[in-house]
Image (tube, helix red, strand yellow):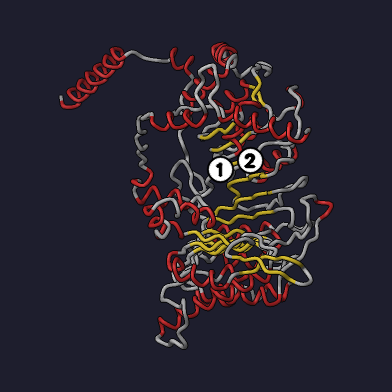
Amino acid sequence: MQSSSSLNELVSIESKEVQAPSNGAIPRKKMKEKRNRVQRPKSKPVESYWADLPDLILEQIFSYLSMRHRYAASRVCRRWYEAFYLPSVWSDFVMTDMTLVRRKFNYYMGWQYVLDHMRTQNCLAAVGKNIKSLIFEPMFSFHNLYEFVVMLTYYAERNEQLRSGKVLVDVRGGQKGIASRISRLRFTFPCNMAPTGREEDEYIFGTGGLLLESLKRLMGSLGRTLRHLQLADLLLERFEALKLLDDVCYSGCETLESLTLINVTKVPCQMLHAGVFVKLRVLKLSPQNLGEDLLILLGDCPHLRHLHIIQNRYTTDNLSPLSWKSWRACRWANPRLNVHLQLENVRDGEVLWQPGSPVRSILYKSAHLKATSGSILTAIDQYRGDLQVYGHLGLPRFHRSKSFHDRIDPLILLMCRQCPNLHTIIVRERISTATVLLLAYTGLNLRFLHVRRNAVVLRRDWPRSPEWSDTFYKWLSTACRSYEATEREVSQILGYKWTMLTDRQFKLMSVDLHQTPFFTSATRASFHTYVPPPTVPVAEKANNAVPMQKRREKKKQERTIAKDTMTGTLL
């Protein structure tokens, strides 16, 4: 009886759910049917104009993307799929550890990423003829790097065979033109094998063996079209470095225009290959690869204009500078040569001063280096008549006090006074608004003054000099009270709208050392040019202004005097 009663209760409950409620509510099924019957207004399709962009803009957009993101963007629409194969999109080919790879299981190492030869061959067959700049980022998978370099070398050598008419065996993907337009090659070796970026955990190794031989073979096969070559952090032995650029000198001695050799060797070793290239214009070297014999060769290079001496964290210590006699001989043989000193990514240290060299710029690219009195005074003493650019790039990671005696304001102003050809100053440390005004007013040839707004202090903490007049001192006192007044006065002095830089702008700032704001024509007798001083500040300019009527009266008087003298001489 109990079981039958329970079954009846369940049936009654189900029947209550099926029957319509007594309060007049509509069941769920009928509600869904009613909703479906309601005619909703159809939404109009949103018009998109991304597919109508011109080819120039699409090429610019795709050039900023990586290879994987380019492939994802090509699947958006047919128009973007066609833009994926535009020539300018593949002008720069960047090779990394994750480029054209596939996963493969190794019994000892587990899952690894190895180079996919089929994908690489198809990729080079499709876009290899458009590559103009080949960039090798630091790759820790040496096997993938070696395989890709060997494959690309085959195509480059095959182009030489096609030019000479000696074609051996034709294989799939060996179309004409692959790697035939490469004019820029940049190779950076990952010499630091440490898992962390701390200096205490550094494990420094150099390259060599089959990888070095394949790289030399690739550079030799690209020598006819190569214009710019950059090799960084190879850290070779002396006997390996002496034969590094033999093939490049043989095939590209008349085509190479810029050469970069940063830390090619561990020990001091002259890279005499740099003096063989006839059309070389820019040379970047580490100080251990520079010597007196190389300076003699560089003096005979007719087109060489810029020599960059760069030091970084992997540069050897305890290096000695070259003698001033060798620099004087090089300067006499090549008077248009400009030397640039640069120090990068170092916690402490100083640039290697080269006495007697025509140094045009001194730049520090490190967040931990401070501007000291010793470095500034040495720069003034050594390169007073040649220095044109001085500064520290990047945001600092140290603290400076706001006290006037602890800041570098007097040293920067002293450099601005002692170096007449200085046209660019980059200051990232604390200075006052009065110092900014004095720098702009004192620099005779100053054209570019880069200052961080967060590092500028609203103060007039300079003691009054006996050389300053009352009007000048009053102008300095009133103009340094606000940032807007300081920017207005500096803009008036420099001749263009000048503003202080934010931290983001200062971090992204770069300096072009190969262009000067004024025309220079150096000769053997004179290495400098004269540029007129900047305009007078607003306060003094208002007092010295002459109305137009007075100027016209003076001109009339001069004309009458000239006529009287002429008539007197005739009579």
Query: Disc number at residue 393?
Result: 2
Q: Marks 1 and 2: CB-CB under 8 Å?
A: yes
- Judging by the rendered image, the residue that carries numbered circle 1 is 510
Vertical position of residue 120 compared to residue 470: above or below: below
Q: Position of residue 174 (x, y in %)?
A: 46, 78
Quadrant of the rendered image containing residue 383: top right
Q: Is residue 186 above or below residue 414?
A: below
Position of the N terminus by quadrant: top right
Farthest residue, direction right: 200
Query: Residue at horizontal 63%, vertical 45%?
Result: 362
Give residue 205's mark. Answer: none
Residue type, numbered disc 1: Ser
Query: Closest to the observer: 47 or 195?
Result: 47
- Of 112 and 197, which appears nearest the observer? 112
In the rendered structure, the answer to whether residue 65 lies left or right of residue 355 reads left
Tell me if residue 565 can be seen.
yes
Q: Quadrant of the C terminus?
A: top left
Type of the residue with mark 2:
Leu
Percent x, y of residue 112: 70, 66
Q: Which residue lies most toward the left here?
A: 571
Front one among 73 and 25: 25
Give the x, y percent position of residue 512. Answer: 52, 46
Q: Secondary structure at mark 2?
A: loop
Name the image quarter holding residue 244: bottom right
User: Which residue occupies 49% across, 56% down?
Assistant: 71
Quadrant for residue 266, please give it.
bottom right
Disc 1/disc 2 C-alpha distance (Å) = 8 Å
Q: In the figure, 491 relative to 118: above or below?
A: above
Closer to the N terminus: mark 1 or mark 2? 2
Taking the image as shown, residue 506 lies to the left or right of residue 280, namely right
